[in-house]
Image (tube, coloured by chain):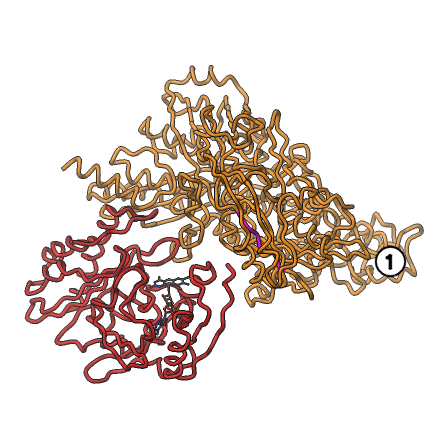
Amino acid sequence: MAEKTVGKPIKRTEDPRLIQGLAHYVDDIRLPDTLHAVFLRSIYAHARIKSIDTTAAQKLPGVVAVYTGKDVAKIGPVPCAAALPDLKVPDHRALASTKVYFVGHPVAVVVAESKSAARDAVDLIEVDYQELPVALDEEKAADAKSPVIHEQFGTNVAYKLTAGEGDIEAALKSADQVIKQRILHKRLAPIAMETRGVLARYYPGEQELTLWTSTQIPHLCRTQVAIMLGMPENKLRLITPEVGGGFGSKLNVYAEEALMGWISMQLNRPVKWIEGRRENMQATIHGRGQTGYIEIGFKKDGTLTGLRYNVFADMGSYFQLLTPAIPTLTGLMLSGCYKIPAIQINVTGVFTNKMSTDAYRGAGRPEATYVVERALDLVAAELKKDPVEVRRKNFPQPNEFPFKTATGLFYDSGNYQGALDKALKMADYTKLRQDQQTARKEGRLMGIGVSTYVEICALGPSAAMPAGGWESATVRVEPTGKVTVLTGASPHGQGEETSFAQIAADELGVGVNDVTVIHGDTAIVQYGIGTFGSRGLAVGGTAVYLAIQKLKDKAGKIAAHLLQVDASTISFAEGKFTSSAAAGKQITIQEVTLAAHVAKSLPEDMEPGLAATSFFEPKNFTFPFGTHIAVVEINKETGEIDFQRYVAVDDCGKQINPMLVEGQIHGGIVQSMGQALYEEVVYDDQGQLITGTLMDYALPKAIMIPHLELGSTETPSPVNPLGAKGVGEAGTIGATPAIVSAIVDALAPYGVRHLDMPLKPEVLWQIINKKSAGAA
Amino acid sequence: MIPASFDYIAAKSLDEAISLLATHKDDAKILAGGHSLLPAMKLRLMQPKVLIDLGRIKELSYIKEEAGQLRIGAMTTHFQVETSDLLRRVCPLLPETATQLGDMQVRNKGTIGGSVAHSDPAADWPAAILALDAEIVATSARGDRVIKATSFFVEMLTTALEPGEILREIRIPGGKGKSGQAYVKVRHPASGFAVVGVAVNLAADGGKCQSAGVGITGVSPKAYRAANVESGLKGNALDAKTLSAAAAHAADGVDINSDLYASAEYRKQLATVYTRRALEIAASRLK
Ligand SMILES: Cc1cc2nc3c(=O)[nH]c(=O)nc-3n(C[C@H](O)[C@H](O)[C@H](O)COP(=O)(O)OP(=O)(O)OC[C@H]3O[C@@H](n4cnc5c(N)ncnc54)[C@H](O)[C@@H]3O)c2cc1C
């Protein structure tokens, strides 16, 4: 009998192959006769293409074909799945034809026998551009005087949307005070360690196209690429081999995916494109990108009355899969973990001459949490109250769940006080505040930041999703008793091969190593949705669990038949079926499985085999929550930030594997630190990408990260039988406001109440320096 | 990220490398650790037709004492400098600099000669080389030529090496009396290169500063010796006030770099603060 593993921090079964370099990413898949594709991308942010001359490129030895926009006009538009009222949707084609809209916009693709021949030929393509004025800042681009990107619309405003409930005007009027604050969420680059990449192979005889692509959504991508190529979906097989991270950037359907398929169909040879890091910075989606205005109304005792958020959301020049939908997620989460009777968001989605924005870890929710948490800090500062007190004052109580927000959500379960209290205790908050008093007396700049967050996970009920929010699983017990799990979720670093195996192993009484989890091949795995929105375990894992229940039900009937007892008397534990009607008799799951396969003695009318499939449709989202506390000291001479403590208590519901949970929290906090302190995609005033390499765009490295002290509480979700909520994005949502808050708090003696990210040392030094100089 | 095509020749000896360089002239580039050259080639900022690899030439990789000097072969890796017992004993500034350079992979492949020959304005070695009053030995068909570090770094990515010359060795004069050294650095959060890097080599006798070498990198288009800092120290007692007053001259007379991370104004402040810190550490090590 195998030991139970659910709830235990067992090591990830996928790690040995990753650590030893034995895993297979797209670029590791080598097919004979493969051609290589390299793109010519626009060097201008906005220009008319007067002519393109590919003659010299075509003549270069080794070059097989050069395609421009007019050659690929038959490929359908790059899809956008977001449906919003009066949405202006630009016609987004695989290659630019008459105009380029951003630096990195693909203009031509060269296909050659070698990568270097393709790359050399790119330099021989002559494009005659007529430069056009650019629109870059989302707020200014919305202005009627701005240069217009898509002439057919006559404006850069892609859509306007108002959401929220309650009478916001009345709520703000009834407040004792209203605070307003402009707030920036800079563009960030997701930077998956593996860049994008596609290998396409067409078999003309079978009329079968196989695409190996680095995506988070194999099935949805297959459907969309088949539509773009006008081919039957079931003639397209899409395989995601190992995927080296996505962070939302591969929750998409990209032009390059369809193009590679199309090219291999033209040339009847395999063709491969591996994105370079510079391309990745230019032409893989960016995240965030909002300029917003907060208005928060509150009573003298700190009770919140209403929150309005007017936001200009930077779309980039085109829509990718979910571009315009991301700010709507911001709107959904504007209640934070507080009772706010009236909430309104007014979104203006704006086209700019930049790469599209889309989902990046947290996708719209980090923006919401940041807005709410900054607002609460402003309220606390104004009322001269402890920020913890103001938060506590507005929490719903544990018995108020499911809790309805003025954004139309029902929070499933929560105990916000519990997580807060635990974090305060771990950090010894009272003592920290005393230390801060001492530090201030000594002229040191110590700051403490607290953020209490809630997020929306386990996306989601299909009614609220553009393309279905369920997930699928098939569980088979093979004749030898080994268990195969086919999941429609598509893990790419999260460790679901381990956590799903734990669920299956415990449920069936086998060892984790007896279970193989297969995903990411549309020819093998039943249709599924994918991995994003912290849904893998809560939705995909639940489907696995439910499939196993069906399977056990069948196995139980076979067991009863073999034990010659009534099926109602059968129970299953630790891999064995026993019967209350036949004391001492038992039969193992392996014996039942063999019987099911050899099929010599089965109950009448029962089909042979032992496999079951489940499509789990969640009734609600889940709402993980927690408290993060950051403690910093800022060097007065240089503005450099020293983290003294970082404490996080996260509640993601039931934990299947605490080590995976910790890993996700670690990664999330680190990405948060990146956003808070370092990261920013910078375009200059001509729309040139200044942070175009990792020499300029600062990703946090291990040495830049302080020790993280993690704790957790476990409030099960009633939404699924696992009680799991999801943890993939929590860190990026909870940490950013805590870090900013700590730094702002450290600078409070200089009258600082808010600063925009990234909080570079120079920014802090300028504040300290100016104020000190002024005082002197 | 795909380099232009090139030929690759692994030289078996220094003489062969010299003659290959003489044959291929401007078409050729010397390949040492490749950690500056190959990234530049992948971005097509450099497109040499021939690479002459020094990697197999054992005679270029050593750290030894000779003729009252420390001598380091050009192909000695950052890692070898970092872990050299000899250097830790007699010139700890070099290992201290190496530990702060790049990451483990970079230190395992990159070479001190390659870095000095490349002369990146934010590289770490030039600061140390300058502070130590080192000499650089260039060799060619014409024989050896010894160049003072102070005249070696000409401008950004340009050195006093002439066409056909290979950097063969770095020589560091033996110390006189007690010395105190230190290297401190502000790492750029993206590249890890120096926003400011300050190397200090002090010698003192009877409580007074006998000699001071202060090399600064990252601050201006080329690494430099901070002459006004040095003159503020020489002959004086190395107390806190002296160190701080001297450090205030860290960026005197140089064009100060400005980028997304640090404006010229802020960089100057960092140079001042980090020079003071380096001086304090070095002075404390004199004891
Ligand atoms: C990720 C990363 C991080 C880094 N971080 C840092 C850092 O923090 N600080 C730092 O200082 N450096 C850093 N570097 C650069 C690293 O130190 C390089 O190794 C070094 O600058 C060049 O040495 P190399 O041996 O790799 O030379 P190569 O790249 O092989 O050559 C560099 C140049 O010098 C020429 N050259 C090389 N050897 C000779 C010779 N003997 N004679 C004449 N010409 C020669 C070559 O032709 C070429 O033009 C980093 C590099 C990388 C990739």
Instruction: Please report the residue visible at 54 percent of the width from the left and 51 percent of the height from the top.
Output: A661
In-front residue for pair B172/A709: B172
Residue A198 located within the stretch drawn in magenta:
no
Name the image quarter holding residue B147: bottom left
Residue type, numbered disc 1: Leu
Task: State the image coordinates of residue A150 (x, y, percent, origin top left).
Answer: 55, 31
Quarter-of-image position of residue B280: bottom left
Question: Could you say which chain is coloured red in the image?
Answer: B
For image coordinates 20% across by 85% down, the residue present is: B67
Residue A40 among magenta residues: yes
**In the displayed structure image, the side of residue A674 where residue B150 appears, left or right:** left
Residue B287 visible? The answer is no
Left or right relative to A355: residue A378: left
Q: Which residues are magenta?
A: A36-41
Q: Give the image quadrant in which the ligand numbered 1 is located.
A: bottom left
Vertically, is A194 above or below A181? below
- Colour orange belongs to chain: A
The x, y position of residue B38, in whole percent, is 44, 65
Q: Nearer the viewer, residue A403 or B209?
A: B209
Of residues A730 and A35, the one drawn nearer to the viewer in this rendering: A35
What is the total number of numbered labels drawn onto the structure image?
Answer: 1
Circle 1 packing at 10 Å, graded few (<14), some (14-19), many (20+), is: some
Residue A436 can be seen, yes or no: yes
Q: Position of residue A76 (x, y in %)?
A: 69, 40
Where, quadrant-wise, is the C terminus of chain A in this rendering? top left
Q: Residue at (32%, 33%) from the top-left corner?
A: A753
The residue that label 1 is drawn on is A563
Magenta segment, principal secondary structure? strand
CB at mark 1 closer than 8 A to ligand 1? no
Percent coordinates x, y for residue B51 in the rendering: 44, 72
Label 1 resides on the chain identified as A
